[in-house]
């Protein structure tokens, strides 16, 4: 009887130990999420000044008072809630500038959404004024369906939408509701 009782105790301990051992999962990502809210950014940068270079040549300079990194979300993004200022330099070191009151970069889609007093000045002195402007990084394409004003050396065009490649070689104001030729 004593042997049977000892066998029962050992079996019970073995079953409990196996249950505990196999019920634990090695899920590091779940452990890392402990204490982090998905609604909070994983990183915050203030007085942000990022310079992009290619082969020793500066190609872009992004400046913002505040950057919030939400890469902890499944559909991750980077937000610039207090605005952004971006200088872009071409191969000849000519500068184009984009300024917006607010910007958000969606990492999975490569779309940049700029909102509020968006002003884009090209190196050729063309200027686009918009309430909102999207930029597709992969296609290098700018677009919006909101009201815009596009000023070139010769014209001032108002419309409800805009499409262009990033070099402005085929810029088009959509649904034109006013066009003026400027004096030289």
Image (spheres, helix red, strand yellow):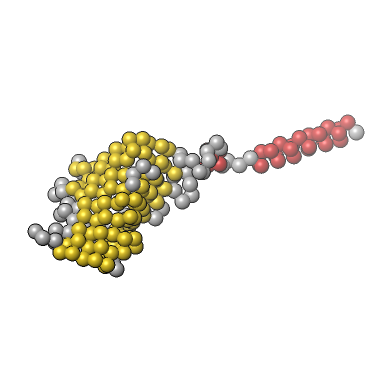
Front residue of 30 and 65: 65
Tell me where residue 25 appears, x and y as whole percent: 61, 42
Asked where in the image residue 152 lies, by quadrant, the reply is bottom left
Q: Say if 5 sits above or below 177 in the image.
A: above
Tell me where residue 75 appears, x and y as whole percent: 46, 51
Asked where in the image residue 23 lies, by quadrant, the reply is top right
Q: Say if 72 sits above or below 182 in the image.
A: above
Tell me where residue 8 appears, x and y as whole percent: 83, 36
Q: Is residue 172 visible?
A: no
Residue at the image position 27 percent from the left and 67 percent from the top: 177
Q: In this view, does 26 lie to the left or right of 56?
A: right
Tell me where residue 118 appears, x and y as whole percent: 30, 51
Which quadrant of the rendered structure holds the N terminus?
A: top right
Front residue of 158 and 8: 158
Q: Say if 48 sits above or below 131 in the image.
A: above
Front residue of 182 and 99: 182
Q: Is residue 137 left or right of residue 89?
A: right
> What is the total number of numbered labels drawn onto the structure image?
0
Residue at the image position 47 percent from the left and 44 percent from the top: 72
Front residue of 90 and 80: 80
Residue at the image position 33 percent from the left and 46 percent from the top: 101
Which quadrant of the rendered structure holds the C terminus?
A: bottom left
Residue at the image position 26 percent from the left and 67 percent from the top: 176
Q: Can residue 159 be seen in this view?
A: yes
């Amino acid at each position: 009887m004593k042997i049977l009782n000892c066998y029962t105790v050992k079996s019970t301990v073995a079953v409990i130990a196996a249950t505990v051992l196999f019920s634990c999962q090695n899920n590091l990502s779940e452990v890392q999420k402990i204490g982090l809210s998905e609604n909070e950014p994983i990183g915050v940068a203030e007085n942000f000044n990022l310079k992009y270079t290619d082969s020793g040549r500066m190609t872009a300079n992004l400046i913002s008072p505040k950057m919030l990194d939400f890469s902890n979300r499944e559909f991750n993004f980077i937000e610039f809630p207090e605005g952004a200022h971006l200088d872009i330099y071409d191969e000849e070191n000519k500068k184009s500038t984009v300024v917006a009151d607010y910007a958000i970069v969606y990492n999975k889609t490569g779309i940049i959404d700029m909102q509020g007093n968006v002003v884009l000045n090209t190196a050729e002195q063309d200027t686009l004024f918009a309430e909102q402007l999207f930029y597709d990084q992969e296609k290098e394409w700018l677009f919006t369906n909101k009201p815009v004003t596009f000023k070139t050396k010769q014209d001032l065009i108002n419309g409800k939408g805009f499409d262009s490649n990033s070099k402005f070689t085929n810029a088009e104001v959509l649904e034109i509701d006013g066009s003026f030729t400027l004096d030289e």
